[in-house]
Image (cartoon, helix red, strand yellow):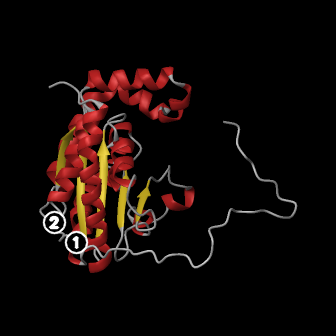
Amino acid sequence: MSDITRREYERHLEPLQQDLNDLMHWLSHRRQRLLVVFEGRDAAGKGGAINAIMQRVNPRQARVVALGRPTEREQGLWYFQRYVEHLPSAGELVLMDRSWYNRAGVERVMGFCTDDEYHRFMEATPVFERLLADDGLMIRKYWLAVDQRQQEARFAERASDPVKHWKISPVDLEARSRYRDYGQARDAMFEATHRRFAPWTVVNFNDQRRGRLNLIRHLLKHVPYDRLEDVPILLPPLESKVKSERFTGPVKAIHGWY
């Protein structure tokens, strides 16, 4: 299957983004909470998928959570605790760019956690997510899949582009030689944590544009929202003449270089 062109991608994305706004309207009106977890291999395309969702929705209602390495204090907390404070409130959508599943993936493969911590995580996670679901939180979890050849091509692109150097960490470089190990860790994670109330869905991201469209379409199909009637916004005419903006005082205005 050939890669989808940018023109095709944008043509299909526009109506999906309108549907996302309908979803956001429903979340707000019904005071529902939606959490979407994005996991996958390095360079799979999590950031691009999240950007496609966030591009046309209200940023006051939707948030992206991308936590860095835990601080010394956070390392002493209950493992899930630093994530709990970022969960959505009523009417909100939260997109997690990696999540508590770091423990089942990078921490397991790279030896950043003990065997006991890993096994306790695998046992506790379905219980934790069941508590969230029973409280009304909708949870959707996506794994963005990418073949090793495609992953290597993306790493090479990032390495050659100074603007994208921040996307490659020492852990990413080490992960290149552990493709099989990460696959085994992923399968064990699916086996232990795939539940009806918090299901995993795998999306092929070898073609990132096609992957974004398929992920958004799946999300919209598997959240039971209703399309609420849109109330037209009528702007009354101005009573006074339209004025140009004027500035006074010491502050200088930039008129532009282009």
Which residue is at 44% across, 52% downward? Answer: 66
> Farthest residue toward the right?
250
Q: Position of residue 226 (x, y in %)?
A: 17, 71
Q: Quadrant of the C terminus?
A: top right
Which one is nearer the viewer's eye here, 138 or 25?
25
Please, what is the three-letter code of the amino acid marked with disc 1?
Answer: Ala
Residue that carries the numbered disc 1 in the rendered image: 133
Number of labels in the image equals 2
Q: Position of residue 77 (x, y in %)?
A: 46, 65
Q: Earlier in the sequence, mark 2 or mark 1?
A: 1
Q: Are marks 2 and 1 in contact (CB under 8 Å)?
A: yes
Residue that carries the numbered disc 2 in the rendered image: 197
Which one is nearer the viewer's eye here, 80 or 144?
144
Give the answer, above or below, for where 204 lies relative to 125. above
Q: Position of residue 147 (x, y in %)?
A: 24, 27
Q: Position of residue 194 (x, y in %)?
A: 16, 55
